[in-house]
Image (tube, rainbow, N blue to C red):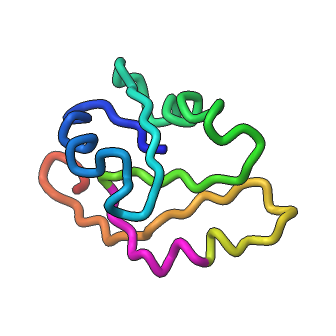
């Protein structure tokens, strides 16, 4: 499932139904941009009780990292991954 919002038409146009990628893609639309947590609610019926990986399309992650997430033990209910970056202090705040 791909959840689209801003420029969703571009995403749908590129991926279409997923056939050319060997996938079957379903779409949901986040009409109101009311937070990143909302996408989980939009996907609730699609995933049901099945395990799933939530990945944001505007945050690029090396694909090798997904294998360790998918291979988690069955008793793991959730995992959150973060990436540490160097924070440089700039005039007017941090960047």
Left or right of 78 on screen, residue 84: left
Is 1 located above or below residue 36 in the figure?
A: below
* Residue at the farthest front position: 19
Q: Report the side of 77 relative to 83 (left or right).
A: right
Residue drawn 37% across the image and 53% down it: 18
Q: Nearer the viewer, residue 87 or 22?
A: 22
Q: Percent from the top left, x then y, of residue 19?
A: 37, 56
Residue 52, x across and y down, in percent:
63, 53
Residue visible at 41% across and 23% down?
Answer: 34
**Up-down relation of residue 43 to residue 31 (above or below):** below
Residue in view at x 27 percent, y 41 percent: 12
Residue in view at x 53 percent, y 51 percent: 54
Tell me which corner region of the image, top left, top right, bottom left or bottom right, holds residue 10: top left
Q: Which residues are magenta?
A: 59-67
Residue lying farthest left?
A: 91
- Is residue 52 rendered to the left or right of residue 12? right
Residue 24 sits above or below residue 67 on the image? above
């Amino acid at each position: 499932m791909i959840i689209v919002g801003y420029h969703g038409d571009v995403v749908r146009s590129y991926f279409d139904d997923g056939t050319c990628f060997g996938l079957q893609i379903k779409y949901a639309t986040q009409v109101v941009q009311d937070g990143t947590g909302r996408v989980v609610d939009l996907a609730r019926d699609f995933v049901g009780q099945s395990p799933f990986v939530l990945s944001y399309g505007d945050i690029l992650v090396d694909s090798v990292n997904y294998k360790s997430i998918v291979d988690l033990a069955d008793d793991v209910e959730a995992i959150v991954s973060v990436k540490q970056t160097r924070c440089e202090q700039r005039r007017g705040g941090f960047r």
